Amino acid sequence: MNTKKYGIKEMVDAVGPITFGNALEAHRKCEELSAKEFALFLGISPSSLCDLEKGRSIPSPKRAANIGRKLGEPEGYWIQLAIQDMLRVANLDYKVSIA
């Protein structure tokens, strides 16, 4: 039996930082939706979804909030991921926390 604790820190150490794109892709895959189905659900184009998932584009905080709302998840979480990605791209070592 493995009793080692595995949480967010361990996940980040193993696979890198949690980004807006990889969180969005993970959500889509957990829901077992194709990119086309998920894009339609979110009200965006499949190419826009692809750009978000691959990190080629980072949504504005407003767009991140809209996506979180459509997913039925806390908007602040998605806003935090988007802002953290913006800081990472700008090589600014700050951590965002949304209350």
Image (tube, rainbow, N blue to C red):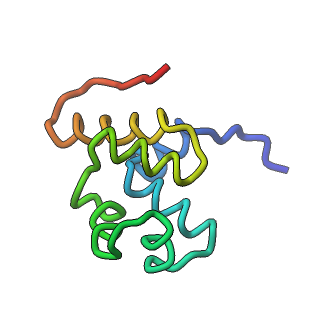
Front-most of residues 46 and 25: 46
Query: Residue lying farthest left?
Result: 90
Query: Residue lying farthest front?
Result: 43
- Residue shown at 36% from the left, 67% from the top: 44
Residue 71, given in percent of the width and then of the height, sits at 56, 53
Q: Is residue 55 above or below residue 38?
A: above
Residue 2, given in percent of the width and then of the height, sits at 79, 48
Residue 48, given in percent of the width and then of the height, sits at 29, 68
- Residue shown at 45% from the left, 76% from the top: 35
Residue 16, given in percent of the width and then of the height, sits at 40, 48
Q: Is residue 32 above or below residue 16?
A: below
Instruction: Tell me if 64 is positioned left or right of 69 in this view.
Output: left
Classify residue 39 by image quadrant: bottom left
Front-most of residues 28 and 36: 36
Front-most of residues 61 and 16: 61
Q: Is residue 76 above or below residue 29?
A: above
Classify residue 95 by image quadrant: top left
- Residue shown at 53% from the left, 66% from the top: 28
Query: Residue lying farthest right?
Result: 1
- Residue shown at 72% from the left, 40% from the top: 4
Across the whole image, how many numbered discs are drawn on residues? 0
Instruction: Tell me if 23 is positioned left or right of 94 in this view.
Output: right
Instruction: Tell me if 39 is positioned left or right of 58 in this view.
Output: right
